[in-house]
Amino acid sequence: MFQYRAGQLHCEQVDLQALAGEYGTPAYVYSKNAILDRWNDYERALSGIPHRVCFAVKANSNLAVLAALARAGAGFDIVSGGELQRVLQAGGDAASVVFSGVGKTAAEIGLALDKGIHSFNCESETEIALISEIATAKGLKASIALRVNPDVNAKTHPYISTGLKEHKFGVDIAAAEEIYRRASRLSGIAAEGVSCHIGSQLLELEPLLEAADKTLALVARLRAAGLEIRYLDLGGGLGVQYRPNERSASIDEFARGLRPKLASLNLTLMLEPGRSIVAEAGILLTRVLLIKQNGAKIFVVVDGAMNDLLRPALYQAHHEITPVSEARSGMAMTADVVGPVCETGDFFARDRELPALQPGDLIALRTAGAYGFVLSSNYNSRPRPCELLIDGAQVILARRRETFEDLIRGESLL
């Protein structure tokens, strides 16, 4: 998806040097075919298993990205009414949408019911009661799954781990059976699924398979109690390779681990991948403004900043940095790569071995297709970057760069 050709880094067939000249920097660049290839990897790996793969919109909610996935037949996992509206605007089928999230409002629930979504992943008994009330008033029946907390250590960054008892997500699996019994007696509710999601950027299969075992045992107990559980939602969470020496479990390995557990159970498997579909398909393209030296410390100051890509500041996340010109590929300096925002936390890399970069050089921050633009902001009154979707030699302006007028839209003078 991103390769050097004639000394210049390309996305598919598009020269990133020329792309930056036309559209400016910073810019997010996504490979459409890389996204669809990874989507198809899930479909192939799960062949023969009744399943529905729902892309986690929170990872990348650009309309062009969602439209490409919708045309490929994807379902969608949403966590807000705004994400539902994005999916529908992009041509997604409401009947393929799963609504997750710990704080759904009455207005969001009502919208989802009106649009006819597939189901709700419920995070509390209080939420189930609210859905029951709204669905009953509308004369509708809502399919729900209770998100259970299996108390499995996901072995990931604490901010993106969600499966332990101290986390805000889900309910204790030990309390789930009683909650299901009460929910099954509510009007407007069809308690048909069990849901579990233990975290994101999981590099090992063991936590995912342990969580699957615990939730499948719950499914067996619920069925024995007379509940018609039709689907099992195991969320997402498969990690990707952010560092060259990092190994993540593959989609095929995950599917092979699940296949014997699901055999003859007459369950539809629901998965909600996000990062593993779009992360590696995207980069943040940014230009070197200047090289600054304070004593022995070297800073490479670029025109991208933490408001454009928050992950390094928020999670201390690693993104490989690739020069767009292959002539700059030899290692020559140890430096911090920083942006113009007035925060010491505004950095993309610290003490990183880098080529001998010069002002005007272009660099690509790799594996930035997930949790990149969606976490961006206008801090320091900085317009957010454009988003470009590449399809072979075609460049699709998926989102134009913001202007000053965009920054102040909705504001008023005294």
Image (cartoon, grey):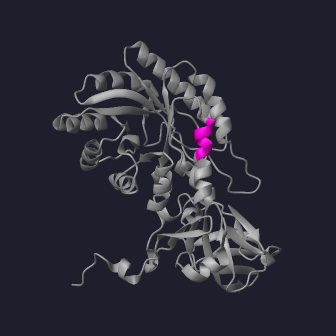
| Residue at the image position 25 percent from the left and 38 percent from the top | 130
Count the numbered circles shown.
0
Locate residue 82 relative to residue 266 in the image: left or right: left
Residue 121 occupies quadrant? top left
Q: Quadrant of the C terminus?
A: bottom left
Q: Which residues are magenta?
A: 40-45
Q: Residue at x 73, y 85 (%)?
A: 358
Residue 44 forms part of the magenta stretch: yes
> Is residue 154 something one can see in this rendering?
no
| Image quadrant in which the N terminus is located | bottom right
In this view, the residue in front, 32 or 150, is: 32
Q: Nearer the viewer, residue 369 or 211?
A: 369
Q: Is residue 282 above or below residue 268?
A: below
Residue nearer the viewer, 175 or 17: 17
Residue 232 seen by the camera: yes
Where is residue 97? Give x, y as percent: 40, 43
Report if residue 188 lies within the magenta region: no
Residue at the farthest front position? 393
Residue 290: image x %, image y %? Answer: 66, 86
From this viewpoint, which residue is outermost toward the left? 137
- 276 and 359: which one is in front? 276
Q: Residue at x 83, y 74 (%)?
A: 330
Q: Is residue 168 above or below residue 310?
A: above
**Magenta stretch, main secondary structure class:** helix
Percent of width and height locating residue 344: 57, 74
Q: Is residue 181 left or right of residue 365?
A: left
- The answer to whether 379 is drawn above or below residue 249 in the figure is below
Where residue 123 appears, x then y in whole percent?
38, 38
